Image: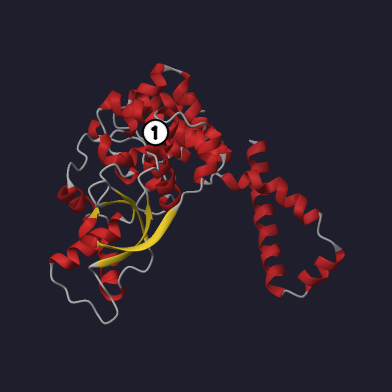
Amino acid sequence: MSLNYIASTVPVSKLKLDLGNPRLYHETLTGNPPSDQDALEASISGDPQFTGLLKSIRKNGVQDAIWVQAQNDGTYLVVEGNRRTTCLRRLIRENVTPPAGVDYEQVRANVLDGTVTEVELKLLAARLQTGKAVWGPFNVSALIYDFHNTHNLAFEDIATEMQMSVTKVKKFYKSYLMFLDYSIATGDTGVKRFAYYNEAPKKVIEWVEDSPKNKKDYHKWINPNEGHTKIRSAATRGGLREFAKVIEDHEALTLMREDPMANVEDAMEVVKQNDIKKEMPFLAKLLPFQASLNGISDEQKARIAAEARIRVHLKSLRAAVDSLLSDLEAFDSE
């Protein structure tokens, strides 16, 4: 996508924040998006990175040109740069005196004309803003959904414009659909739960889709409004990585379903009892380790021989193995 623009300087007083900014998709989902410029300023000011940006602009001004589109009434719609614009507005409103060489009243801008379409503006914003922390995966996925369903863009075209793989675009799209289904079913619009779909192992997603019962249970177990979230975050202990192991163990899964207080950590205890390799994962590494030892070359052995500490470790390992084998033989003789 190539758009014509004019590099210019525009008055901050002529700038209009973009109420349709894709950054606000998460607020649209809650049914309470900003309805006017003041509400949007308040939303942007709540951004966790806003204070740091405000301090930087107060000291140095806006360093990078914002992107705007000229409007028929002589104003400029901010396509990219809403946070910087909000910072400048606050500094002007609070009558802050800029340091030498800095101007809060004017800002450099790349000005697009009125012929640029809505979808072109969204694509431009996506290319300029995607990947910034304040966007978050949910807003990226919602934008992809909007491109595909509202503007009929193919996944391949979206991938090209957003500079990501087609596979990743499709994953974001599917995660958004699954989260939307969850949100409608439970009434929970907290976008933090989006990670339970976008970061879930493939095995978990397949399990959720396998039956209405699985989906209903999953909705209940990740919903904080149910009073007892059984699955924690995506990667921590008690999260989705461990839940992927639980769904492979019928007894562990039954515990989660039948005990109102049982969570993934409780179910994992059952998994470990039923599978010694999951209780002691290092056992699965014994054969690869043995193969690595057997594959050591003469040159490598010579280097190891020069390391006294490694010899000590190997002798300790041999003693531990001999002791374990002796204990196992005692079990065999009982």
Q: Nearer the viewer, residue 285 or 134?
A: 134
The residue positioned 44% from the left and 17% from the top of the image is: 211
Crowd band around label 1 with a 10 angstrom C-alpha radius: few (<14), some (14–19), many (20+): some
Q: Nearer the viewer, residue 159 or 133?
A: 159
* The residue positioned farthest toward the right in the image shown: 298
- Please state if 93 lies on the left or on the right of 327 as rendered: left
In the foreground, 207 or 250: 207
Q: Residue at x 39, y 39 (%)?
A: 117
- SS at mark 1 in the image: helix
Where residue 7 sits: x, y (%)? 40, 61
Please give the count of numbered marks on the rendered protein: 1
State the residue position of label 1: 146
Quarter of the image where one finds residue 88: bottom left
Q: Residue furthest top?
A: 212
Amino acid type at mark 1: Asp
Q: Position of residue 266 (x, y in %)?
A: 39, 36
Q: Residue 223 in the image: state x and y as whole percent.
A: 29, 33
Q: Position of residue 162 (x, y in %)?
A: 49, 45
Residue 233 visible at all: no
Judge whether residue 289 can be spotted in this image: yes
